[in-house]
Image: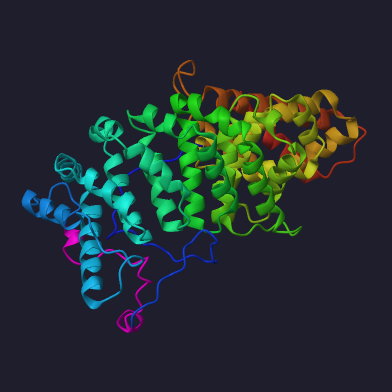
């Protein structure tokens, strides 16, 4: 699943949550002043943007005096006072606070295209680069990366940014910082940069094995949820852009991206134990979205060292009793299975697990609002039910028939929803494959129920027979 298009972020509007756990990548926080403690403000390396006029300046429709923007840029000119290089005096702190305040306002203003173009024309990138080279302050680096990240979201600036001497190399080097906030902004910047017309220069700069190993190390080791999400969003952007994928995806896969992604997912699912309840849905959703993106890559399954663990993990998600709590995970799970069903062995594995089949039917209401996931669920069923009709013993087939009848309400609701959304022109609709999967599944369901009804040796309850005829009637509307 590809990530949503990257948009500029606003420091005024961004609600930055504190880390839930200590992150070994994060630099030590600086001491708060008494005034900051009284006002319950965050540490000085992670303050919010100034709550003054910045919130009124991020709209394109708002007129901002160019001289004001230029004056803000001038305030960022080095040399600035670094806490590691100079004594912390009242005067120094005042200058640092001014720098930070001006930087946060510019960060907000850079979200607007007009202001962003004005900033670039007035050499803001040169000023920010000078600060990135000279400063050792994580907060200053974070603000610099945040401003450049917003600039990179504007396609009109893509060629200018990609051609600025030293910019790409300097940004890539920031991936080796140990501060989580800086890394978050670095990944957001890179995600935006590889999605615009300057993608080639950025992708080639990332091609170094040292850089790619660092990216994978962060993915595998960070405890910071925001950094975890940004890292995955960047990797999904790589997968989603075919041109970028041609440059970066193969070396990433060779360095173990597939195994790391699957390991992150399986470890998260295994933490829930055997109670069919899954926790930490934010981490689960991001981890499985990465596996979903990779599952569409050719020969993905061949690159995974522990295929069985992946299959068991996906089955557990579909068997979970709290499916609506992990709806995004269920959507991704069926999409991954649909991508992997070219492997005939997988069809046999799924076919032999009745609880998995039951979980797949129970997933239909969960994926109802996601057309792609719903079509994938029906496609999986068409493959499994087709194998079942041909290979199941009579006893197993009749057991399957009774399970299908127990799910009659779910099946009918999903069929009715599919009928309402049936495309007018199947030859050109993206839903053609999904519609084919629904019809194939319903054809198999009819065959299974008719065989069950036709066996006179069976002892059946009256309501079961009634449900069987009702289901056949419902299926006839679709065929």
Residue 94 at least partly seen: yes
Tell me residue 321's x, y (percent). 68, 55
Q: How many marks?
A: 0
Going 20% across and 53% down the picture, which residue do you hit? 58
- Quarter of the figure with residue 435: top right
Res 407 visible:
no
On the picture, is 157 further left or further right than 228?
A: left
The colour mode here is rainbow
- In percent of width and height, residue 210 lies at 53, 39
Q: Mostly what secondary structure, the magenta segment?
A: loop
Say whether residue 241 is left or right of residue 146.
Answer: right
The image quarter containing residue 447 is top right
Range drawn in magenta: 34-56
In depth, the one of 350 and 250 nearer the eye is 250
Q: Judge left or right: residue 178 versus residue 465.
A: left
Magenta residue check for 53:
yes
Q: Nearer the viewer, residue 66 or 443?
A: 66
216 relative to 469, above or below: below
Residue 315 coordinates in the image, percent (x, y): 72, 44
Q: As rendered, which of 271 and 435 lies closer to the eye?
A: 271
Residue beneath the point at 26% across and 38% down:
154
Residue drawn at 33 percent across, 29 percent down: 198
Name the foreground residue: 374 vs 145.
145
Whole-percent x and y of residue 92?
24, 71
- Residue at 37%, 77% (x, y): give it: 32
Q: In which quarter of the image is residue 471?
A: top right
- Asked if the magenta segment contains residue 195, the reply would be no
In the orientation shown, which residue stands out farthest toward the top? 427
Q: Is residue 381 left or right of residue 176?
A: right
| Quarter of the rendering occupied by the C terminus | top right
């Amino acid at each position: 699943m590809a990530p949503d298009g990257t948009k500029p972020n606003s420091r005024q509007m961004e609600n930055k949550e504190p880390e839930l756990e200590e992150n070994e990548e994060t630099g030590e926080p600086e001491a708060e002043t008494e005034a900051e403690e009284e006002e319950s403000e965050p540490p000085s390396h992670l303050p919010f943007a100034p709550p003054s006029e910045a919130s009124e300046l991020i709209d394109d429709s708002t007129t901002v005096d160019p001289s004001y923007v230029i004056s803000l840029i001038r305030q960022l000119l080095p040399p600035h006072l670094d806490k590691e290089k100079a004594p912390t005096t009242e005067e120094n702190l005042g200058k640092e606070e001014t720098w930070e305040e001006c930087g946060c306002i510019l960060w907000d203003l850079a979200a607007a295209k007009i202001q962003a173009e004005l900033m670039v024309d007035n050499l803001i990138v040169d000023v920010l680069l000078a600060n990135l080279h000279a400063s050792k302050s994580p907060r200053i680096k974070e603000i610099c990366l945040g401003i450049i990240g917003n600039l990179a979201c504007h396609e009109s600036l893509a060629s200018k940014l990609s051609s600025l001497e030293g910019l790409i190399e300097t940004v890539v080097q920031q991936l080796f910082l140990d501060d989580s906030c800086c890394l978050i902004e670095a990944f957001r910047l890179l995600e935006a940069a590889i999605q615009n017309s300057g993608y080639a220069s950025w992708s080639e700069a990332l091609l170094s094995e040292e850089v790619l190993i660092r990216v994978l190390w962060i993915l595998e080791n960070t405890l910071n949820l925001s950094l975890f999400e940004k890292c995955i969003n960047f990797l999904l952007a790589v997968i989603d852009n075919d041109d970028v994928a041609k440059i970066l995806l193969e070396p990433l896969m060779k360095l173990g991206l597939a195994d790391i992604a699957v390991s992150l997912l399986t470890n998260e699912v295994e933490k829930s134990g055997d109670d069919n309840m899954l926790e930490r849905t934010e981490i689960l959703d991001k981890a499985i979205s990465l596996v979903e993106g990779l599952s569409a890559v050719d020969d993905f399954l061949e690159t995974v060292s522990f295929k069985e663990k992946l299959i068991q993990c996906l089955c557990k998600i579909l068997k979970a009793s709290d499916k609506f709590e992990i709806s995004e995970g269920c959507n991704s799970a069926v999409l991954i299975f649909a991508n992997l069903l070219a492997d005939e062995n997988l069809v046999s594995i799924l076919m032999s697990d009745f609880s998995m089949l039951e979980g797949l039917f129970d997933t239909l209401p969960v994926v109802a609002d996601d057309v792609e996931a719903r079509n994938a669920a029906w496609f999986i069923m068409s493959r499994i039910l087709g194998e079942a009709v041909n290979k199941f013993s009579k006893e197993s087939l009749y057991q399957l028939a009774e399970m299908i009848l127990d799910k009659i309400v779910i099946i009918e609701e999903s069929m009715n929803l599919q009928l309402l959304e049936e495309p007018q022109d199947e030859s050109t609709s993206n839903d053609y494959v999904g519609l084919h999967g629904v019809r194939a599944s319903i054809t198999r369901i009819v065959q299974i129920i008719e065989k069950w009804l036709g066996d006179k040796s069976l002892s059946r309850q009256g309501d079961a027979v009634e449900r069987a005829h009702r289901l056949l009637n419902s299926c006839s509307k679709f065929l």
